[in-house]
Amino acid sequence: MNILVTGGAGYIGSHTCVSLMEAGHNITIVDNFINSKKEVLDRIKEISGKDFKFYKADVTNEVSVEKIFAENSFDGLIHFAGLKAVGESVEKPLEYYYNNVVSTLILAKACLKYKVNKFVFSSSATVYGENQVPFTETMELLPTTNPYGETKAISERILTDTAKANPDFSVSLLRYFNPIGAHESGLIGEDPNGIPNNLMPFVSKVATGQLEKLSVFGNDYDTPDGTGVRDYIHVVDLAEGHVAAIENLDTGVNVFNLGTGKGTSVLELVNAFIKINDIDVPYEIKGRRPGDIASCYADASKAEQELGWKTKKTIEDMVRDSWNFERKNY
Ligand code: NAD
Ligand code: WQD
């Protein structure tokens, strides 16, 4: 297939581009580098040994999007481009609603006009809010505590309504859990600007000495060791989930959790990192972070049954590959 990948220079997008080309697909990337670097494109080429077309453009710009669709013939699209910092979305709601919702509207409109009938969307487990774990795709979505989560829920609704009104147009809404890890080459991985908000990049930067100490946000949750439990998924497994999703996308609205189905606590993850990489990560227990929930993990059975996809990599693989990327690139 010829696949347009928006946000293909980003963390999950770059790994997915590699997996798509390994599976024999042709890709075109569009990115404005608002949260990535152009060098990533060379690294995708180095890993895959393949070339691809690239547009530096903002997908909220309808003229740019129109040009990209007019110049190519796509079979499908994977829409990663978006802003993703939960805390920042509370500070700058308009930027988040504009970027994440307008991009979805413009791309869906272009798909209808140019008859691109497969739309795969990066959603998030955050849309489940405070439902009971494990989260299943049929659960009613609960309001999230931040604008970022709302942009995902609204985009899901826009795409669902569009597919209902246009029987030829099909969508796959992929709800990711917590992606960590990196490509085993160490050439691509998660490279956030500034001080990381997420646990794994923070741990990696403490291990290099760039940050002094990890704060563990709360040890009084109703979880086995009191620290927050999440469903960490290796980004390469996640990338392969996208290949399975677009290859199986034929009709209608399809919703899939992409997770492992297994919860891991903050302390379990930190201790695995210390043990596997044989490096110290100083930490201290602090108060809970506002907006956090105790536990978040997937019922991952639907993707396995319907897409034939399931995760292969372990927590040990994830912490090893995260550290391999960090130490080669910091
Ligand atoms: P990322 O920031 O690394 O990648 C996003 C890419 O999109 C970046 O390269 C950025 O430059 C680009 N971009 C953003 N806005 C753009 C625009 N208007 N036009 C063109 N390019 C634009 O993020 P990621 O972790 O790879 O996440 C990819 C998608 O998955 C996002 O939509 C994110 O919300 C979603 N998601 C991420 C996580 C996570 O924990 N990383 C979890 C669930 C969902
Ligand atoms: C994981 C656990 C923290 C940092 C976020 C978004 C979600 C999705 C994935 C995009 C929690 C604890 C963290 C630290 C800590 N993104 N923690 N010290 O919050 O589960 O999910 O990223 O869609 O929408 O909300 O991920 O990595 O920030 O936190 O103790 O310095 O680590 O409290 O229990 P989270 P995270």
Image (cartoon, rainbow, N blue to C red):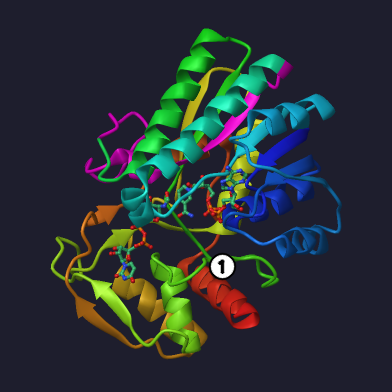
Q: Amino acid at mark 1?
A: Asp
Look at the picture and state if 91 lies above or below 226: above
Image coordinates for residue 282, horizontal then vertical, percent: 34, 88
Whether residue 103 sits left or right of residue 272 in the image: it is right
Label 1 beta carbon less than 8 Å to ligand 1: yes
Image coordinates for residue 276, horizontal then vertical, percent: 49, 82
Is residue 35 within the magenta segment? no
Based on the displayed image, in which of its 4 quarters is residue 257 positioned?
top left
The region drawn magenta spans: 114-142
Name the residue nearer the viewer: 313 or 328: 328
Based on the displayed image, in which of its 4 quarters is residue 242 positioned?
top right
Whether residue 13 sits left or right of residue 216 in the image: it is right
Task: Report whether residue 74 is seen.
Answer: yes
Task: Report whether residue 306 is seen.
Answer: no
Q: Residue at x 58, y 35 (%)?
A: 60
Label 1, secondary structure: give it. Answer: loop
Whether residue 16 sits left or right of residue 100 in the image: it is right
Look at the picture and state if 87 lies above or below 161: below
Mark 1 neighbour density, 10 Å: few (under 14) some (14–19) many (20 or more):
some
Name the residue nearer the viewer: 207 or 82: 82
What is the quadrant of the N terminus in the image? top right
Based on the displayed image, in which of its 4 quarters is residue 63 positioned?
top right
Q: Total number of numbered labels?
A: 1
What is the quadrant of the C terminus in the image? bottom right
Whether residue 58 sits left or right of residue 279 in the image: it is right
Q: Which residue is mark 1?
A: 191
Image coordinates for residue 181, horizontal then vertical, percent: 54, 66
Q: Quadrant of ligand 2?
A: bottom left
Q: Residue at x 18, y 68 (%)?
A: 226
Name the residue nearer the viewer: 60 or 111: 60
Is residue 135 within the magenta segment? yes
